[in-house]
Image (cartoon, rainbow, N blue to C red):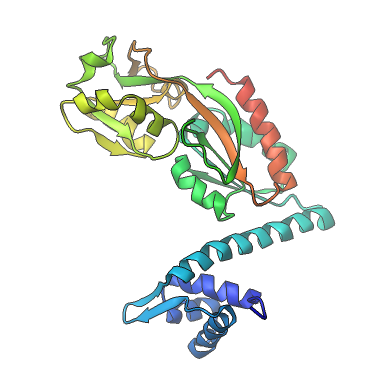
């Protein structure tokens, strides 16, 4: 390859993928359609491959296009991060920080953590995204998140991110107050219960599914699966479902008088970790947030 793609090539390519059509991308970027098409042709000529298949319903990526998109997303996000960090140094700005985290963090340490962080870094732009690690890891790899916090399955540790353990959280089974099974002491007693179970292929819930696979196979009624903690809590409160949550999650939202923790102690605990990309160094803003996060996790009674 004689020449590398230009920034204009990368930005145009990403916008076309996001808009799913050349016409929509041209409108979004304030360019004429012929000018944008010319830029795409230059990019494909520079790379020596076809990136798009153009059809009546829009564009689709070729295999080479899919591979190039992954690199393009990371390059542009990393370049933006570099520009932000230089601005912090030269203009005493406090930069941007994007953090992804699971529901447990949102319902426990995050309100105080964010307040403390913003008190020391009032001009930092902080973006928060709640989700399971299965959803957050792709965003971390693409450079859209600086940090991702969630549970790690010790049998399936990702090899392209830095993983730092934060705390271990015991989990429990919850039901509404007055549920016929709220005094059950073994999983065997719960085979005919209605279950709502968290669905993910990464972290604690995958570990739980692996370890309790035999029990899951004995459940009389097919469980309902969801990633939404709000949906889960409402199904527990309104429809007699049982679900599995971190013990610390059974206390927030003023639900102590409405939710019972079943006296079952055979569930494995979960290792919560913070992760960041191996490919890029943390910004100063991210490093300072990480220091506050470590302290908050150490001080909280999980």
Q: Quadrant of the N terminus?
A: bottom right
Q: Nearer the viewer, residue 138 or 196?
A: 138
Q: Where is residue 256 drawn, in percent x and y?
A: 39, 18
**In percent of the image, x 52 and y 19: which residue is there?**
302
* Displayed quadrant of residue 240: top left
Q: Where is residue 94 drawn, in percent x and y?
A: 74, 49
| Vertical arrangement, residue 199 with respect to residue 208, above or below | below
Q: Nearer the viewer, residue 62 or 170?
A: 62
Q: Where is residue 199 drawn, in percent x and y?
A: 34, 38
Residue 279 is at least partly visible in this image: yes
| Number of numbered labels in the structure image | 0
Name the outermost residue toward the bottom: 34
Residue 258 is at least partly visible in this image: no
Name the outermost residue toward the right: 90
**In percent of the image, x 75 and y 45: which residue is there?**
284
* Displayed quadrant of residue 292: top right
| Vertical arrangement, residue 249 with respect to residue 68, above or below | above
Q: Nearer the viewer, residue 65 or 300?
A: 65
* Displayed quadrant of residue 57: bottom left
Q: Where is residue 188 drawn, in percent x and y?
A: 23, 15
Say left or right for 271 vs 230. right
Say left or right for 19 vs 277. left
| Vertical arrangement, residue 43 with respect to residue 97, above or below | below
**In percent of the image, x 20 and y 25: which residue is there?**
219
């Amino acid at each position: 390859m004689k020449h590398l793609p230009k920034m204009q090539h990368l930005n145009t390519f990403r916008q076309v993928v996001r808009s799913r059509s050349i016409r929509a991308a041209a409108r979004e970027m304030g360019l004429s359609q012929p000018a944008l098409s010319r830029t795409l042709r230059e990019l494909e000529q520079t790379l020596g491959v076809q990136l798009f298949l153009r059809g009546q319903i829009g564009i689709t990526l070729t295999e080479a296009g899919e591979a190039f998109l992954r690199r393009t997303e990371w390059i542009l996000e990393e370049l933006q991060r570099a520009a932000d960090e230089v601005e912090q140094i030269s203009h005493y700005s406090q930069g941007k920080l994007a953090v992804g985290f699971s529901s447990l963090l949102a319902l426990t340490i995050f309100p105080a953590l964010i307040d403390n962080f913003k008190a020391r870094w009032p001009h930092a732009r902080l973006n928060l995204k709640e989700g399971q690690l299965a959803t957050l890891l792709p965003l971390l790899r693409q450079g859209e998140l600086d940090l991702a916090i969630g549970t790690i399955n010790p049998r399936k540790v990702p090899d392209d991110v830095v993983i730092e353990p934060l705390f271990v959280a015991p989990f429990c089974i919850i039901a509404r107050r007055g549920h016929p099974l709220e005094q059950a002491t073994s999983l065997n007693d719960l085979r005919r219960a209605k279950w709502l179970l968290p669905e993910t292929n990464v972290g604690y819930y995958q570990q739980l599914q692996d370890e309790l696979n035999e029990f899951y196979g004995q459940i009389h009624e097919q469980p309902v699966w969801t990633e939404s903690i709000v949906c889960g809590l409402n199904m527990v409160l309104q429809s007699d479902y049982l679900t599995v949550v971190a013990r610390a999650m059974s206390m927030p939202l003023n639900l102590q008088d409405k939710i019972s923790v079943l006296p079952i102690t055979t569930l494995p605990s979960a290792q919560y970790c913070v992760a960041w990309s191996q490919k890029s160094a943390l910004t100063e803003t991210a490093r300072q947030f990480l220091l506050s996060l470590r302290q908050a996790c150490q001080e909280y009674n999980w």
